[in-house]
Image (spheres, rainbow, N blue to C red):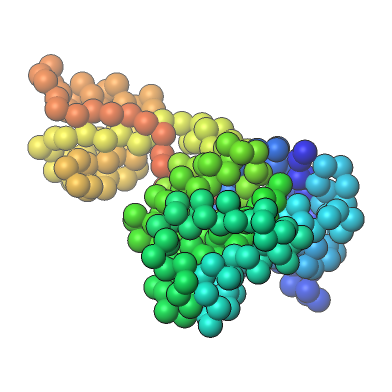
Amino acid sequence: MTLQLEHVTKKYKDFTAVDNLNFTIEKGEIFGLIGQNGAGKTTTFRMILDLQETTAGTITWDGKSVNAINRDVLGYLPEERGIFPTMKVEDQLYFFGELRGMKKSQLKKDIDFWISRFELEDRRKDKAETLSKGNQQKVQLIASFIHKPQFLILDEPFSGLDPVNKDLLKDAILLLKEQGTTILFSSHQMDNVEELCDHLCLLKRGVSLFSGSLLDLKKQYGKTRLAVRTEWSTTQLLALEGVKDVREEKEQTVLILEDESFAQSIFEQLSNGKYIEKFSLDYLSLDEIFKDKVGGNIVEV
């Protein structure tokens, strides 16, 4: 089963939110949709969920139009959270599961499993409004997939989570993938996208700048990120042929090269025939590529 977007466009009067978008997500894949705020990510999610109509183009799941499929095959964690503040954690999960056609007897095992997995055992009888933002986020996440959807959309799932809970969420996403769930998610935190995604689509103002595998995206730039440890100053390094930029990082200096072919001559000059502690040439990180593609800095929401 695949999700396929073909020439999808969404217009609001004179404003085009999504412009001729094309991508395919295969069954059991984790696919990242990334872009700055206002790039069209949430609009795309809502069209996939048939909460908004497309202006043009088609969206299909397993060859059928999304407006003709059983809605229970879909799961959705919206960026705007929506759990009931006065309802107990455990009751919330039963409510959302039964709302999607599951019986209480079917839900118990999975609810117990996920409450334990997300370290909420001692809070299961608490009202949601008494939980921390991170724990509320975990409850809503479980609610989005407790009915075992075939296709799951996660809009900024890592927002508000501390590093420990981010790791719990990553593990959960990978487990769902192992179980065959197809996952589409967005995040402003490029390290999460880089770690989890098989493929991705990069949006800028509704237009796809790239769609494909992360490695293919990195290959467009080549291996131009050179990490070194050297006593040379920034001024000296910038003067080297082929060096576009120099960035000081913890315990190393990073040179951004015009092309990887310059690495050999730079190595010879820095080492001068002697031992050099670190000299590592690699692809740019997704964070660096993102900033280069869309411009500006990544802003957490």
Q: Relative to 67, is 61 above or below?
A: above
Q: Is residue 240 visible?
A: yes
Residue at figure coordinates x 42%, y 68% from the top left: 123
Q: Residue furthest bottom?
A: 86
Question: Looking at the image, which is closer to me, 261 or 219?
Answer: 219
Residue 186 is left or right of residue 229, and the answer is right
Q: Nearer the viewer, residue 15 or 168?
A: 168
In the depicted view, which residue is nearer to us: 300 or 81? 81
Q: Residue at x 51, y 70 (%)?
A: 89
- State whether residue 256 is above or below residue 77: above
Q: Position of residue 133 (x, y in %)?
A: 42, 72
Q: Residue furthest front?
A: 105
Image coords of residue 247 (percent x, y): 26, 47
Quadrant in the picture for residue 98: bottom right
**Nearer the observer, 232 or 281:** 281
> Relative to 181, is 3 on the left or the right?
right
Q: Quadrant of residue 163?
A: bottom left
Q: In the image, what residue occupies the spot 66% across and 66% down?
A: 96
Lateral position of residue 70 relative to residue 283, left or right: right
Q: Residue 180: x percent and y percent? A: 65, 38
Identify the residue at horizontal 54%, vertical 67% (top origin): 90
Q: Residue 154 location, x and y as percent?
A: 59, 57
Give the number of marks.
0
